[in-house]
Amino acid sequence: MTISPLDSSLAPLPDIALSCDGILNRAYHLYQPKKGYRFGTDAIVLAASVGPHYGNRIAEFGAGAGAVSVALAHFCPDAHITAIEKDADMAACLRHNIGLNELSDRIRPHEGDVTDLASLFADSFDCVVANPPFHHPSGTRSRNQRRALAHHGDEADLADWVTAALSVLKPKGWLSFIVRADRTDDVLFALRDQGAGGISLQPIYPYKSSPAIRVVIHAQKDVNAPFSLLRGLVLHHPNGALGAEADEIFQGKAAGVLAAPDKRPQ
């Protein structure tokens, strides 16, 4: 693919310092700010955790430059994705990157706040995915406004993101969030409080001997099904090299390899 941000057919990029970075073995490229929040491991792991059996209408909350949505389009080739982002500069990058990667027929951008979607998208999606702001509100906020918003959020907390996701899901639709391991209980409480069931957890470990640093949380709207603990993913060998499974995921070769089993309780 020839990468040209000057193509007049593409949505304009914001007037900020940007870098162009490849994902999934550089099969796709994304423009994103050089400073502030930048996509990383979490985006690809989240996308790889969603399998085709989750359904074909997917919404991504807090899409940023589009890493999760682009990876979802790769891992779930029949999916149609609505990518929702509130920051104007990031939304501009998102629109540009969708066209740049020739995914305009698969990914629809929407600039708006995830907590203000119920009237527009009520009961619309088979699955909602998000890498929400999951740092503790009392923690030190970055001086970079965009990074602070991505890590800590604004007035909305994790429970608000859960509420928003459930409001736009179809009955028995799936929610898949990736969060810092020590915020798992906040999401679980919100899910149970709002009647979600079939909750499952996928721990993500930096090394086999280390505690989990991230957890992918799956749940279904308005179902009564038991909790399950899915197998975890170990990212690195002791020498720092990527493990075989993680390497396949980041190269885009293992579509849906982390997805929960097809046979789920209903």
Image (spheres, rainbow, N blue to C red):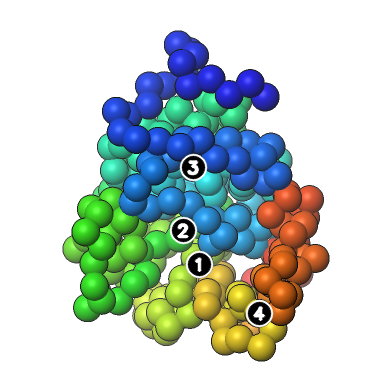
x and y percentages locating residue 80 in the rendered image: 58, 39
- How much space separates mark 4 and mark 3, taking CA atoms? 27 Å
The amino acid type found where label 1 is placed reads Ile
Residue in view at x 40 percent, y 62 percent: 132
Image quarter (top left, top right, bottom left or bottom right) of the C terminus: bottom right
Query: Callout 3: 10 Å neighbours few (<14), some, many (20+)?
Result: many
In the image, taking residue 76 as reference, residue 165 lies left or right, namely left
Residue 207 badge: 4
Q: Are marks 4 and 1 in contact (CB under 8 Å)?
A: no
Residue 130 badge: 2
Residue 92 badge: none
- Front label number (4 vs 1): 4
- How much space separates mark 4 and mark 1, taking CA atoms? 18 Å
Residue 105 shows up from this direction: no
The amino acid type found where label 3 is placed reads Gly
- How much space separates mark 2 and mark 3, taking CA atoms? 12 Å
Task: Reply above or below: 163 against 56.
Answer: below
Residue 66 badge: 3
Q: Are marks 2 and 1 in contact (CB under 8 Å)?
A: yes
- How much space separates mark 3 and mark 1, taking CA atoms? 16 Å
Residue annotated with mark 1: 178
